Structure formats: C-alpha cells, structure tokens
C-alpha cells in the first residue's frame, strides 16, 4: 500500500511537471484571445463592410476546421514555405487565433443583445463611440457573456492536450509516458484528477466573477 | 450672444423634414423655442412628436432643413445634398447644451444611481471627480433620491428611475431639456413624482420640450402647446386657447378622446 502511494506521488509529480506547459499555453491563450475577441467583435459589427466580410471569413474558417488541422498547418505547413516556428510559438499562435474566432462570435452576440436605448442614452450624454463602448456597452457585455466565456475556458484546458501532435510534452503526454513504462492505469487517473482540478478552479473563478457582476441585477 | 436676453432663441427649426422610407414623419416643420419656455408637444402616436425631439439632439438626422441651437447651426441639409454640413465633432459640442429623458429611462444598469449621474460629467466633460460627485449629490437631493444614491437601477421603482434619468441629464448642466414621454411607461401612482420634478424645473425657468399624453399636466406646466398630426404642427397655442377653442377640429376630437380615457 505504502509503495503504491509512493508510486502515485511520484507519478503525480512527473505529470504535474508536464502540466507546466499546459498552464503556460492556457495563460497565453486566455490573455490574448479575450481582448482580441472583443476587438474583433467590435470590428465585425462596424460600419465598414469589407472589415465585416473579412471577419466573417475568419470566423468561418477557424470555427469550421479542426483545431488539430490548424495546429498541423501552423507548425508543419508553414515550415514548408520557410516559416519555422518553435512548437510553443506555433501552438500559442494557433490557439489564440482559433479561440479568438469563437470569442468574437460570443462577444458580437453579446454586444448586439444590449438594448439600443443604452446607446441612445450615451449619445444623449454626448459620449463618443469609444466612451460608449468602454464605459457603457462592454461592461454589460462582459457580464452577459461570462457563461459562454467560461465554457470556452473549460474547453481550452482540454484542447491544450492537442499539442502532443507537434511534439510537445504536456500533462497528458507525461501520463501516457508513464502508462507505456508501467502499463498501469493510475497515471491516466492522476491526469484526469489534474484536469478536473484545473476546470474546477476555472468554474469557481467564473462563478465568483458572475457573483461580482450580479449585484446590479 | 446675450444669455440674459429673454427673447433669446434656444432652438430654431426651419422647414425640417424627415422620412423613414416612404413614410414622411416630419413634414416641413418650423418651430422656435425661446429661453425659459416650456413647450408641451401633443398629438396622436406616429404624428412625429418624438422624432422631432430626437432631431434636436442628433438622435435622428433630418433629411432637409436647418436646426439652430442657441445661435449655432446644429444641422443643415438641403434637398439635393443629403449630407450634413456640420461635422460630427461640432454637433457633439453643440448637443452638450441639450439633455434628454427617455420614455424607458435607459439608465445604465451596471452603475449605481450616483454612478449614472456622475458618469458623463467625468467621462465626457473631463470634470474633476470630487466636484462631479458633489454636484451629482446635490442634484439627487433636488429630485429627492439622495438616499438611493448607492442603489442599482434594478432595485428602484419606475418613478425613481425616471427621476434618476432626469438627474443624469441635469448632471451635464444643459440649457435645454427634452422629455420624450417621460411618464408613459410609469404606473399611474408614480406619474406624480416625476411630473413634480419637471414642474420644479419649469419654475427654475429651464427651457423644456415635453412630448406627453398627459393633457392636464401639459396644461399646467407648459407655456405653449404644440399639436402635431401626420408630421405637421397643426396648432401652436397657449394651453387655454388650445384646450378651450382649438382652431382645428382634429384637435378637439383628440382631446376629447384622451380626456375620456383619463376619466375612466
């Protein structure tokens, strides 16, 4: 029994080491994709038709093809035309662009759900476009889009496992290595627990955020 | 421009027209509003009352004609060139002189009552926050809502919401207030508290345009009543004249109908 506990502890330590990369990729994606999603959403509903078409094309492509394919394309595909990216760079780039596409649609819907009376009130108070967006519209959009953003944040934790296909070591790959070495199911169970811990933290964080914003409802 | 001149023209609308598609909403409307005047605009729904009001602060663009606010041209279009000659920036500068209150309040739900009143003076006018707060509290006191300053709009009644909306508009220190059916969305028992705030403003000689269906209130508060029908101003008269012997039969029918409804 004691031996087994030692084995679990050692395995967990090894797998956790692998999860550092998962967390880094996660952080980079969240930090860049959310602001980018908001910016692109604003552009997608702007009065500039060419911009709207371009962004419609963008969300169509990146939501309509597998993330795995996009990862292959960025890492292997681009190297054929001479663009050689480090695995982490390629992964981060792909994840940011892919997740921004989903978030763009989430925030676009959020912005469009705000009553036009809010714009009129802001206009009647002589706010310009940026003041209206920053002070009036976007704070309400952020509140309304917490649940779908939380969904994306959870999916992202699990999607990070895809980076093994471009040769990166992450949480799941560490677990798989232990499985191959020991032919035991425990490493997978440990990986599952770590994923669950991460998603639990995320859900808790978004719940707190929702509570904070719900005071005005 | 001499600001103490009682005959100073606050709003001049000259031959303004406005259509939504094939439907003409404003048909060659001309109107002058003097300093300190309170004008009630009445008429059947769809007669263009609200649109007229919304043209004065740029929420709607006119198709042709000219709007002058306190001597500055705010909007000018001729029949051929459907492009306003006044820049958006210049418009915003002029529009600072007008405050507006909406039928459905349109308060900012994510800000407290105080936040709603203090937001624009800080963000738009760049005034010092401590000064703005002091002024906002004074205005809230005036509309009787000082004790609600930390409440969010979802937690207060419709009448209170509308009073906050009035306070919010007053926070920008406007010369002219536009009211677009300020009591139409309110339960009957809440109408009085909003009308009282508007009456108080009238006593302070605030220039006001009020679109309303409340005939009695219009008669009490207004210096002039304008009756609109099908995009035209049909009559522009003192309340007593308009109510007692309207020139136009259409007005009599309308007033009778409204009075019957109110009596019920």
Image: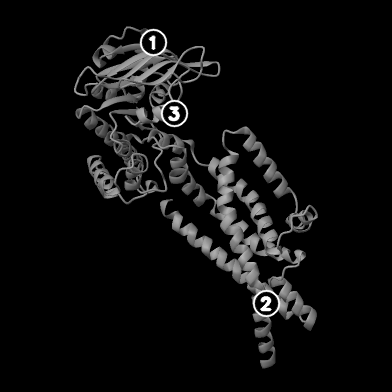
| Label 3 Cα crowd, 10 Å radius (few <14 / some 14-19 / many 20+) | some
The one nearer the camera, B206 or A173, is A173
Secondary structure category for the residue under label 3: helix
Q: Is residue A78 above or below residue B15?
A: below
Q: Position of residue A134 (x, y in %)?
A: 46, 45
- Chain at tag 1: B
Q: Which residue is mark 3?
A: B88
Q: Who is closer to the viewer here, B152 or A177?
A: A177
In the image, residue A123 above or below residue A85: above
Element under label 1? helix
Residue shown at 54% from the left, 54% from the top: A146
Residue pointed to by mark 1: B250
Which quarter shows the N terminus of chain A?
bottom right
Does the image show residue A177? yes
Residue most extreme to the bottom: A2
Image point (50%, 20%), residue name:
B83
Residue B3 placement: quadrant = top left
Q: Residues within 10 Å of mark 2 (few under 14, many from 20)?
A: many
Tag 1 near tag 3, CB within 8 Å: no
Q: Kindly tell me whether residue B253 is visible in this rendering.
A: no
Q: Name the chain under label 3.
A: B
The span from disc 1 to disc 3 (Cα, nearest Å) is: 39 Å
Quadrant of the image occupied by residue B92: top left
Name the residue rendered at 64%, 34% in the picture.
A50
Q: Which mark is residue A15?
A: 2
Foreground of the two, A110 or B224: A110
């Amino acid at each position: 029994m004691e031996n087994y506990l030692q084995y679990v502890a050692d395995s967990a330590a090894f797998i956790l080491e692998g999860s550092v990369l998962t967390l880094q990729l996660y952080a980079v994606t969240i930090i860049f994709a959310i602001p980018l999603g908001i910016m692109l959403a604003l552009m997608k509903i702007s009065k500039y038709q060419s911009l709207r078409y371009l962004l419609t094309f963008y969300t169509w492509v990146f939501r309509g093809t597998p993330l795995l394919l996009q990862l292959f394309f960025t890492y292997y595909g681009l190297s054929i035309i001479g663009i050689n990216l480090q695995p982490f760079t390629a992964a981060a780039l792909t994840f940011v662009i892919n997740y921004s596409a989903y978030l763009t649609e989430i925030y676009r819907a959020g912005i469009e759900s705000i009553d036009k009376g809010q714009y009129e009130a802001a206009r009647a108070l002589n706010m310009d476009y940026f003041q209206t967006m920053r002070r009036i519209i976007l704070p309400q959009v952020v509140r309304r889009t917490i649940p779908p953003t939380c969904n994306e944040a959870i999916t992202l934790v699990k999607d990070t496992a895809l980076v093994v296909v471009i040769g990166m070591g992450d949480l799941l790959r560490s677990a798989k290595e232990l499985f191959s070495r020991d032919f035991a199911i425990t490493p997978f169970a440990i990986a599952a627990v770590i994923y669950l811990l991460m998603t639990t933290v995320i859900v808790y964080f978004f719940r707190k955020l929702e509570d904070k914003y719900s005071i005005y409802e | 421009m001499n600001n103490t001149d009682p005959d100073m023209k606050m709003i001049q609308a000259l031959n303004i027209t406005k259509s939504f598609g094939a439907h003409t909403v404003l048909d060659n409307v001309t109107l002058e509003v003097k300093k300190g005047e309170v004008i009630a605009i009445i008429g059947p729904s769809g007669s263009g009352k609200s649109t007229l009001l919304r043209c004065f602060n740029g929420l709607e663009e006119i198709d042709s004609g000219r709007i002058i606010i306190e001597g500055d041209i705010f909007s000018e279009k001729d029949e051929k060139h459907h492009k306003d000659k006044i820049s958006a920036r210049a418009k915003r500068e002029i529009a600072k002189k007008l405050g507006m209150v909406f039928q459905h309040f349109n308060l900012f739900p994510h800000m407290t009552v105080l936040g709603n009143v203090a937001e624009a003076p800080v963000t738009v006018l760049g005034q010092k926050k401590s000064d703005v707060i002091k002024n906002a509290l004074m205005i809230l006191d005036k509309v009787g809502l000082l004790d609600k300053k930390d409440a969010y709009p979802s937690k207060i009644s419709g009448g209170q919401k509308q009073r906050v909306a009035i306070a919010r508009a007053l926070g920008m220190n406007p010369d002219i207030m536009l009211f677009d059916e300020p009591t139409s969305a309110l339960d009957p028992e809440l109408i009085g508290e909003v009308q009282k705030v508007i009456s108080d403003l009238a006593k302070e000689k605030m220039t006001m345009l009020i679109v309303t269906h409340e005939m009695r209130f219009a008669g009490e508060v207004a210096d002039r009543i304008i009756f609109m029908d099908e995009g035209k101003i049909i009559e522009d008269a003192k309340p007593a004249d308009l109510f007692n012997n309207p020139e136009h039969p259409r007005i009599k029918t309308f007033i009778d109908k409204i009075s019957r409804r109110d009596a019920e």
